[in-house]
Image (tube, rainbow, N blue to C red):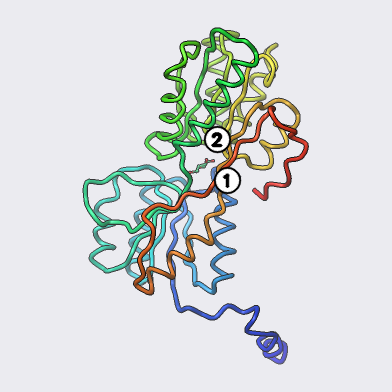
Amino acid sequence: MALGLLIGCTGPAEEPADPGLLLGFSQIGSESAWRLGNTRDIENAASEYGINLMLENANQSQENQIAAIRRFIAYKVDVIAFSPIVEDGWDNVLLEAKEAGIPVILVDRDIETEKEGLTTCLIGADFYNEGVMAAEYLIRKADSLGLDNVNIVEISGTENSTPMRQRQAGFADTIAGDERMHILESIDGDFLTSRGAECMRYLLDTYGDDIDVVYSHNDEMTLGALPEIEKTDLIPGKDIIIISIDAGQEAIDVLKEGKINCVVECTPNLGSELMETALKLKNGEEVDAVIHPTEQVFSDEMDVSAIGPRGY
Ligand code: GYE
């Protein structure tokens, strides 16, 4: 008791004033270092801002996410946030939130809908630009190696998710004007390490040493694919150019070992923006429709030893 009082007295400077805001957040799952980092960042930001967070992990299931949003509505939270696992299928539950007068923030991924005003804004990366940056790296690499034909296999993220669609489109649009570039196949790896390995086994069985490039939509799938390449006589990073997205610590370590050539950053640190936005909505203020963090590219074009700790 005495200790509690003492801690209580150590200062309003450290203790955030309680804004009296209850935020319900439905997270997709725990499929990647990115996702774990994102959950951690949102939890930390909530306690920094003194916001009460009801966080639910949907274990990669849209049904679980819909059920969580319904619980948030029943609890009468002030603001709902969620990262939609796929883009479609949200209209009914979001109409229920709208009828209950609860504003909804999209975190990380977008939805597809014909209905107006179901969500207030999106806080997340510009996935299209990530695909563009990955392709621009590849074009520079092909130039520097003097390649005249480049066969690419693409291991893509969860079907119908925003990062899958946009990373694919940004990459495809950017290589479209370059006659050297050919996508042999795009295959669904669901953002998972195990699927990345399975996809790579299939691709190696099918195309063997015709493969010049692996473009993988996240680090986990890349990290699953690398050992499969190493089981053949092909050397990742040398015989096959490896391009990944996320830039979590493990992938950066492998980039430093030379087995990955390029990793496009996707930051999971969206927590502060989420809290700021939730507070504005609670106070009836306007918010920006889209908030994109700035992101960079890490590659063998730079001094990779200088890349600092990533934090996820
Ligand atoms: O790239 C992947 C995660 O939506 C940006 O989801 C996120 C993606 C991220 O599982 O690792």
The residue indicated by pointer 2 is: 218
The residue indicated by pointer 1 is: 34
- The spot of residue 254 in percent (x, y) is 71, 32
Q: Is mark 1 within 8 Å of ligand 1?
A: yes
The answer to whether residue 254 is left or right of residue 282 is right
Is 249 situated above or below 117?
A: above
Q: Amino acid at mark 1?
A: Trp
Q: Amino acid at mark 2?
A: Asn
Q: Is mark 2 within 8 Å of ligand 1?
A: yes
Q: Nearer the viewer, residue 45 or 13?
A: 13
Res 34 quadrant in image: top right
- The spot of residue 181 in percent (x, y) is 49, 14
- The spot of residue 97 in percent (x, y) is 29, 63
Mark 2 neighbour class, 10 Å CA radius: few under 14, some 14 to 19, many 20 or more: many
Q: Residue at x 41, y 55 (%)?
A: 82
Is 59 situated above or below 56?
A: above
The numbered mark, 1 or 2, whose residue comes first in the sequence reads 1
The answer to whether residue 79 is left or right of residue 196 is left
* Disc 2 secondary structure class: loop
Check if mark 1's residue and mark 2's residue have beta carbons within 8 Å. Answer: yes
Q: Nearer the viewer, residue 210 or 74?
A: 210
Q: Residue at x 48, y 78 (%)?
A: 19
CA distance separating discs 1 and 2: 9 Å
